[in-house]
Structures are given as C-alpha cells and as structure tokens.
Image (tube, rainbow, N blue to C red):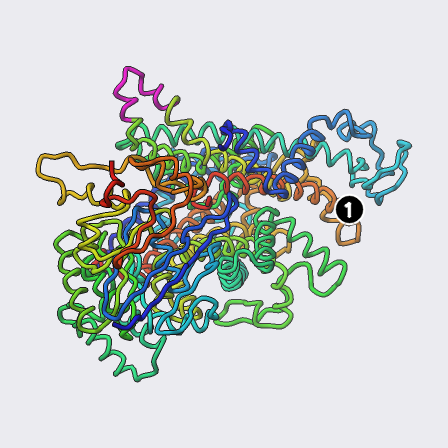
Amino acid sequence: MTAVLEVRDLRTEFNTRAGVIRAVDGVSFTLNRGEILGLVGESGSGKSVTGFSLLGLVDQPGRISGGSIRLNGTELVGLPESELRDRRGREIAMIFQDPIATLNPLLTIRKQMMMAVAAHSRMTAKAAEARCIEVLQRVGIPDPVARIKGYPHEFSGGMRQRVAIAIALLHDPAVIVADEPTTALDVSIQAQILHEMRSLAAETGTAMIWISHDLATVSSLAKRLLVMYAGKVVEEGATATVLRDPRHPYTRGLITSLPAIASPGEDLLQIPGTTPSFLSLPPGCPFAPRCDFVESSCEKMPEITLENERMWRCHHPLGLSGAER
Amino acid sequence: MLGFVIQRLLQAAVVMAVMSAVVFVGVYAIGNPIEIIIPPEATQEIREATIKRFGLDLPLWEQYFIFVTNLLQGDFGRSFIYNVPVLELIAGRLPATLELVLISVVTATLLGVGLGVYAGYRPDSWIARGIMAISVLGFSVPSFWVGLILILIFAVNLGWLPAGGRGEVVSILGVNWSFLTPDGLSHIFLPALNLAFFKLAMMIRLARAGTREIMLTDTIKFARAAGIPERQILLQHLLKLISIPIITVFGLELGSTLAFAVVTETIFSWPGVGKLIIDSITVLDRPVMVAYLILTALLFVLINLTVDLVFAVIDPRIRARGA
Amino acid sequence: MIEQQSPLRQFWSEFQENRLAVLALFVVIVLALLAFFAPYVVPQNPYDLENLSLLDARRPPGFVGSGGYSHLLGTDPQGRDLLSAILYGLRISILIGLAAGVVALALGTSVGIAAAYVGGRVETVLMRIIDLQLSFPAILLALVLVALLGQGKGQLITALVAAQYAYFARTAYGAAKGERRKDYIEAALATPLSGRQVAFRHILPNCLPPLIVVATVQIANAISLEATLSFLGLGLPVTEPSLGMLISNGFPYMMSGRYWISVYPGIALIILIVAINMVGDQIRDQFNPRLRK
C-alpha cells in the first residue's frame, strides 16, 4: 500500500469579528492509493472545511494555520497559489453536493470540460474533446458525443453530477475529495452513483475522501471511517469495526440514529442537543454537554488513544471493560 | 423562440395601450392650454375657431380616440407653440440626445463593470475602497450639481472645455452628429461625463455585488477545484454570470438616462429632446409633452423587449422555456 | 456568557463599529437641528424683504453689508445673507424630503401590504401598476406632475410622493408576501383576530427593517429630487428658496466667477444627502443577513 495523501495535525482557522473559529483543529489521517475514506459528522463539524483545506481553497477570512498535507510526497501547506493551482484538478480534484450549483448554467458541457482539460494539458481541440467524451462515457453518460454539446439544464440531477465527476476525473487525479456528492440526489440514483464511484476507484486507482453527514451512504462505500466533531477527529478505524463496536459516544449516537440499525417499531435514537458553536466550545471534551456518559474528567480535553489500527479521543471509551456503565 | 417573441410583442402592445391612455388622460385632465395658446385679447370667434382647430371642444374620450387613431398613423399632432408637427420637432432633436445618452451609458457600463468586478474581487483592498467611495458619491450627489461643478472647473476656471452647445457637427444621412468632429467632441465631453457619473456608480455597485455573490458560489469553487486559472474563471465564468443583471440594468438605465438627460441638457444647453420637454412643460405645450411621454414609454417597452431577447440568446434555460 | 442585549442596543453597538456611519449620523443630526432652529441661529431673516438691499447683492464671502454684519459666505442675487439663506433652504429641503418620505412610506406600505394580504385580482392589478411605474424614471414622473400641478409645497410633495411611493409598495409587498407564507401568520389568521389586526400586528412589524432602509434612501432621494426640480425652475416659489433654488439662482453668475452663490448651498445639499445615504448604507448592511458572518 502506498500513501498518496498524508495529513498531519492540520489546522484551519477563521478570524472573525466574534473570535477565532478553529474549524479544523489537528486533523490527521493517511489515504492510500485506490482507498475510499469516509469522513462523517454533523453539519458544522468541520468536515467540509477539511476537504477545502486539502485543495488549498479555504475562503476568506479562513486560512490554514498549521500542520502538513503531503500529496504524492509533496508538501502542500505553504506552497504558492500557482503551484497549488497546478495540482488542483491534476493531482487532487473535488466534487460538490449540488450539481445544479457547480456547473455554469450558461456554458455548454463541452466548453466547461475543455476549460478543465486546457487548465493542465496542451492538446489539440480534437484530442481534448476525444478525452472529454471518453471520460463522459466512463461515468455512464449515454451518447456523450451528442450530449457534450448540451447545457447543464438539459441534464437530470444525477446526470449533472456524473458530468461533474467526469470533470474531476479528466486528469486521473490521485485523490478526489467528494463533499456530500449524492445528498441532493434521489435514493436510486444515489445507489447507482455510489456503485460507479466504487468501481471507478478500483479501476483507476484514484483514492477518495467521501465527506457526508449520512453514515449509511459512507459506510456502504468506505473501507475506513473518520468521525469528526467540532473540528476534531473523535474516532477513526475500519468501517466494519467502528460500526459494530464504536468507542466514542458520539459515534454510537450517529449509529443508533440510523434507520437501518433500529429494529422495526423501535424509536430512532437521536443525539440530544445540537452541534455547538465554534465560538462557545466547552473547555474540555466538546461533546461533553451532549454526552450521556459525561463525568468530571471530561472537563479536560481527552488525548488520542491508538490501539489495533483504531483511534479515539475519549476519556471513557465504550466497548472496553468497565468503561460503560 | 418564435412563440416567446410573439408573447413578448403582445405584452408590449398591451403596455403601450395602457400607457397611452394614462398619459393622455393624465396630461389632458390637468391644466388648461386654452389660456396659453389663445391671446387674452382675442375675439370670441378666434377663440372658438382655435378651440375647434385643436379639437379641444370634443369630449375627452373622443379626443383620445382621435389621438390614438392619429398616433397609429404616426401623427402626434402639432405643437401649440411652434406650430409644426410634433414628430418632426422631436425627430430634429433626437440625434443630439441619442448620441449623448449612448456615449454616456456605454462608457459608464464598460468602466463601471471593470471597476465593480475589481472591487468585488478584492473587496478589502484600498483601490476597492476608493472605487466604492466614487460610487457612493456618484449615487448621492445630484446630477445637476455634478454638471455645475464640471462647468465651474473645466469651463470657468480652467477654460479647457466649452460649457454649452453642440459645437461643430457633421451631417451623415441628413442627421447631424457632434461626436465625429474634434470641436463637437469637446462639446459633448462634459455633458457625457455628467450623465455617465450616476450610471457609473450604479454599474460599479451592481458589478461589485454580483461579483461578490458569484465568487462565493459552488460554480467558482468547482472551477477552482478543477485547477482552472483565475484569469479564465473571471473571464469565462464570472463575466458571463454577471452579464444577466448587467444587461437588465443596462437596458433600464438606457431609458432612465434619457430621462436624466433632461437635467444635463438643461445645464449644458444641449439642444436635445430633454431641453425641448422642459421648455414644453413650462409653457404647457401638451402635444409635445404627450408625444414625449408616449415615445419614452415606447422606448422603454422596446428596450425591455430587447433585453428579454438578449437574455434568451445568453441564457440557454430561457431559450428552452420559450421554445 | 454573552450578555443578553435588547435588539435596539445591539443594533446600536453594531452601528458604532462603523465610525464613518456614526460621523454621518452626527452630521445628519446637526444639520437637522440647525435647520429646525434656523430662525434663532441665522444673522438675518432671508424672507424679510425689508431687510434686503440690492446694494448688498452678489457680494463675496466676508463682505460687510449695510446690515452691519459681515456675510460669512457672501450674498445671493437678492442681497440675502447666503449663510442664512442656506440654513433656511436646508429647513425647507429637509421638511419637504421628510414629508414626502413619510407620506410615500405610509401610502406605499399600505398599498404593498394590502396587495399581499388581499391577494387575487387586486394583487395582480396593483402590482402590475407598481411595476410599470417603477420601470419609469421617477424624475420624469415628478417633472410632469409638478409642471401640471403648479408651484407650491403641497404640489411638490404630491409629485414627490407619486414618484416614490412605488418603491415602498414594492418593498412592503415583497416582505409581506414572504411573511404571509410563514406558518405563524397562518396560525394568527386562524385565531379570532380580525384580518386587519393580523396585517398590522404581525405582518407590518416584520416588514419594517427593509422599509426603514428604503425610507432612508428615499428621503435622501426626495431631497435630491426636490433640489433638481427647483434647479430646473419647477419647484417652490422664489420667495422661499430651497437649496436647489439657491443653486439655480446662482448658476447664471457662475460663469462670471461668482461661484459662491451656487457652490455653498450645493455643498450643504451634498453633505446632507451623502450623510443620509451613509447612514442608510450602514443600516442596510446591518439588516442584510447575507453579509453577516
């Protein structure tokens, strides 16, 4: 296994009038070739900002304030914008939640794809168009030769997302960051796209970071899970292990609120409370105010525990003898 | 596309019918022109003859009917004061106004979009703040005052440019134009600047707001994530996306600039339609007022129609809906 | 813990963060006070023709006139002390702007809320008229109305209101329409409160923020429009000159270098309008949730 992306202690801050928001606060993980990594958490947990940080696309007034991102062995943090630009779309690409919002409604698919090709390679218009059509075919657009001349509004939501995925795949990047790419789609189309993404990752060796608030979709796709809460990774491990035997109470909360987990007739469990504001985080464990197992030690920030290829950040992890009461 | 055009044309016709009635009644219901056109020492016979000649003895609806019938034949009546056909009067003044308005609006738009996009793209830079200060000023300061100051500085104190008139004109196809001669250009410079100032402020604001909004959209983020160079993002995505509000406002502004030309033409003694309408208002020359308002309304309708059609060309979604 | 503040205090503390806006507000208040107390602060009553001497006309700033005091800003073509005339002119401009703004606000808001509330045909027809009017430049409308109605304060205010109420109507309609769809209005309509009570107690307060913004801008616009009309000779009678009229009176003398007759009233006018607009801009930014972070 070769690591294509190594993230160490990544920190992204937003300097606002009301105070400093640490949206990404010491996130670390490693992504191997062809691997699909799931990044889950409620909205506002910092998972999208993590995704944007990887591409160096954090909006003002945000900035990466520390840590390291190594993509194919090159350190990205501190790299000048022109170098970052050169890697975006070529080595690391990103797709977004709403395919209606990502494609420019006023330009043809051809124009938008050709721009993306031209961003990184010099080839004749003919060769470029052939490349576009080839990738469109690969993501499952029927009759790409004709459809490429169309405008985004002529495509259905699922087809539009396929076009967006095609644009991300144009230069066979090592990593694709997928930020809730199926959330806006119908369930059946969601399943199709998930299926195709899985085979694409396997065929091309492209690694993926699948960001979602929906544990169900992520777990059907990702080999490994990263659970984020208030800017920090609170649990990491192989998907099957984490689902079966969660360590962090927050992870357990996410699992028990899944409809598929609850037995028929049983009420769905909800995590009480809401995601805290980044500006008023408690001094210790950020999850403490919502946690069923809170005790005095939770007033201090829990350290990371590493064990058997798993990681968690909790004072009293579940599933270990004596910890649960 | 054809259905779209027909639908818009019908809408335009309805608006024009309503406008003509409103303008006619509005202008004719108030004020009595008889006192103005007939000298007080005139005999009763002359009075009656004059009233009859202008059709002022007929009931209002009948006057309107005659008015509309004539209108449809291109006859706007004769000016009470100049005693020439109104259309001829206005047509004679129109080129002067048109060249002034077009030069102003086009300049203001090109300059305003450029400055506004910059101010929206780098909102915190000092240049952006300077641009916004200009735009606030342009918005707040009344147009006539800007004209006054321009005259004071460039005509009175510096003596660089003339303060009024059209200067030397060139006749092309029987129409006189100022902007084609150096002297005419020096005459049109100040009034055009005056007229452009407010539009510039408007365009800056619009382009800045549009840019700020669009730069935050996923379309731009996605383009950036694909590694597309910033210059292309600005030229291809941004300019295309902000063109929709810009074109709308460009159209509307073309109309309102014609209205504002009234003020500028008065200050700079520019012999255009605006000056004519002010003179007509002060002497209650009804046919000229009515014709001016109707023609302005027509112009507005035509501009709106054009804007809609241009939209259909730019935005494939509208094209699809109209088909 | 963050201290719980009343909305008004919170608004003010946010407003204070923009120094320029505070300065602008201060300027507006000072100008309004000067205008209001003009009769007590000016050295000369510019309306009292007995006081005026044509010998004193068009004198430069600093000239000591026959009245015995020096005219700080010079005199106008009628021999009025320009400073006094400006303060009185400011008084008229502010008065007309406020009156037109308030009447247009009341009329426009009523029309807008009525359209949103009644719905159906009435709504369609009313809003069509409003939109049609909005596509027509306000200045033209005011120009024609003033020309037809004749000179005088009442006529001028009527023309300004007619030219401006549509902006309020559009804004109120938009806000009310948005509110109308919300659940709490449906709930309020289900209670025994009369429809009118719902409209006034629930819909109106929620339309206020955008209306306040439009009102500030429109008062500035009314002042500017009045000045423009007066400048074109279609505003108030010459005996009680507003700022626009003062500027207009001085215009013919500008060519011969007697700049002050036009320039000083103009400066007063611009300070007033720019200051009001700056306050309005700040209020708009504060009400705009999209710009808040």
Chain bearing tag 1 is C
- Label 1 residue SS: helix
B121 relative to A298 in the view: left or right? right
C219 relative to A172 in the view: left or right? right
Tell me residue C287's x, y (percent). 47, 38
Q: Quadrant of the C terminus of chain B?
A: bottom left
Tell me residue A155's x, y (percent). 19, 61
* Front position in the image: A89 or C292: A89
Position of residue A84 relative to residue C72, above or below, is below
**Residue C198 colored magenta?**
yes
Which residue is identified by label 1?
A: C260
> Farthest residue toward the left?
A264
**Residue C230 colored magenta?**
no
* Front position in the image: A32 or A212: A32
C5 relative to C116 in the view: left or right? right
Image: magenta residue range: C186-200
Would you say residue B250 is visible in this rendering?
no
* Front position in the image: C203 or C117: C203
Position of residue C95 relative to residue B135, above or below, is above
Tell me residue A142's x, y (percent). 13, 69
Position of residue A239 relative to residue A145, above or below, is above
Residue at x 64% of width, y 55% of height: B268
